[in-house]
Image (cartoon, coloured by chain):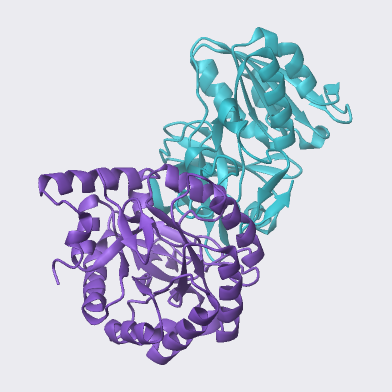
Chain colours: A purple, B cyan
Amino acid sequence: MNLSIDFLGVTFPNPTVLASGILGVTGDSLKNVVRNGAGGVTSKSVWLERHEGHKNPTMMGTESFYINAVGLPDGGIEKAREELGKYLDWEDRAPLIGNIVAGSIADFKSVAEKMAEIGPDIIEVNISCPNVEHEFGKPFACVAADAAEVTKIVKNVSKNIPVIVKLSPNVEDIAAIAVACEKAGADGLVACNTFGPGIVIDIDTAEPVLANKVGGVSGPGIKPLAVKKVMDIASAVKIPVIGMGGVVTGRDVIEFMMAGASLVGIGVGVYYRGASVFEKITEEIEDWVSENGVKNLSEIIGKAL
Amino acid sequence: MIDQPKILKIDEVRDENPTVKTFVFKGFELGAMPGQFVNLWIPRVDEKPFSVAYCDKDEFWLTVAAVGPFSKKLHEFKEGDKVGIRGPYGKGYTIPEGKKIALLAGGYGAAPLYFVAHEAASRGCEVEFIVGARNKDLLLYLDRIEVASGMNLHVATDDGSVGREGYNTAILEELVGGVDMVMTCGPEVMMKAAMGICEKAGIQIEVSIERYMKCGSGVCGNCCVDGLGVPVCKSGPVFPGDMARKIEGLGEWHRDNVGLKVLW
């Protein structure tokens, strides 16, 4: 069955995309995600230079939610050149979204330039990580003008590679931020990053479990919130959206697509259903599509809007 | 499996050698199989993975060498102190029934392999337990292995201070022809040598791979091995030799906390 989706001129064999921050540390780990059925993969957030993350525990899962404060550890853009290059040379590869992050506008420009040299199919700009606030202050995604400025600078140096911007749900009006990014030249949007921050306290020791104390919240419990964010964005802009947040099943993917997402990110779905979650979800989408007589999956995008 | 740390009291601390201690936790059924690991959390310090050295329905042991800031901190802990435990995580060793097996332990690797030996002996296996270390101060668990039924102890030290002088792999070479299966845990270079010996002899081997870990649940990707691309915390830490042979850089490099290659 053909579940392929055209997103910004790039063909994804199915709508599931590995979300940034999960598994994608090396070229070979990205390959393994594709072998498990992902329609596309997103790298971890790449910094210009080496960036240390937080101490452990960095994450914790329960049935209903997942919380993490990994702190975007990364070996820097030269490591990405080697690892993403290795992935891009692989003949069975699926589309690659190269995710970049920086603490300043100037660094965003430099890291985007270098990411463009590496040549992923799409560049994703992470302006919304809640776990590096102590280093860089409020994320750029929290102020429309800041989000627009980063978008513009990245777009300027990314040559012909489409640029998508990953937004934070932790804002008063996500549609306004989305519109600001669209006006600044974003080719697409990603929604959303984790909610919160939240905290989990171990009651036997009265200590927060995460070393960073607070962390971004994801998982099945936040799915309805994320679906609403995607709807708010899709209603406000014309550019396409990758939706994500607590996706575990094929039905979740359909739901995000009906809310306006063209592709759907899988993150902690890997935690809940294992590495083969992509294959499982794709099979569930196929079942739903054939039961409902959907001829072309892109028909359902925005159907609930 | 528990993913939110469970706070447990340390019931006993045993000195194994000048740098290694065993922490015993009683009254909690962890349910770990040999080769599996747990994440041990010290609030406000850090959390690190440790192989389970022994586990039954009443207690489990973690044998820890003081090598870095975290393990040195743990060594300050006494009976009655509390730590957080989550797990058990990962895939362990295959425990056969009624077979002849050889275990090859390098240094601290003797602890998780003791758990293998204990389980295998209880299932009617005859165990050739080969341990090796640089010198006699670094050996551990010898007294337990010596008195256990179904286990034959063989010792090698680099300096000859106990047992045979030289590498323990020389003993494996002599014994490999008489066993059905080999399991190993220790320095990667030693395990790689053991893989070569077993391949030549046509004997199945399982190896335990150590990588920098964060989540323990196959999510963060930090412990993914090159070549296979799979996370060690979920697909391993124990791999059959056929799979381990596909790991790129085995015995040569691993990756640090930001994913950069580091030579062993």
Question: Where is residue B194 shown, x and y percent of the image?
Answer: 70, 25
Q: Is residue A184 above or below residue A274?
A: below
Question: Where is residue A261 shown, x and y percent of the image?
Answer: 26, 66
Residue A267 shows in this picture:
no
- Image quadrant for the N terminus of chain B? top left
Q: In the image, A295: left or right of A10?
A: left
Q: Quadrant of residue A214?
A: bottom left
Count all numbered tags in the image, as a single digit: 0
Q: Nearer the viewer, residue B90 or B59?
A: B90
Q: Is residue A294 above or below residue B193?
A: below
Which residue is found at the position 63% from the left and 63% from the top? A75
Q: In the image, B219: left or right of B23?
A: left
Question: Where is residue B228 shown, x and y percent of the image?
Answer: 55, 39
Spot the residue most to the bottom: A145
Q: In the image, A298: left or right of B91?
A: left
Residue B129 shows in this picture:
yes
Q: In the image, A168: left or right of B127?
A: left
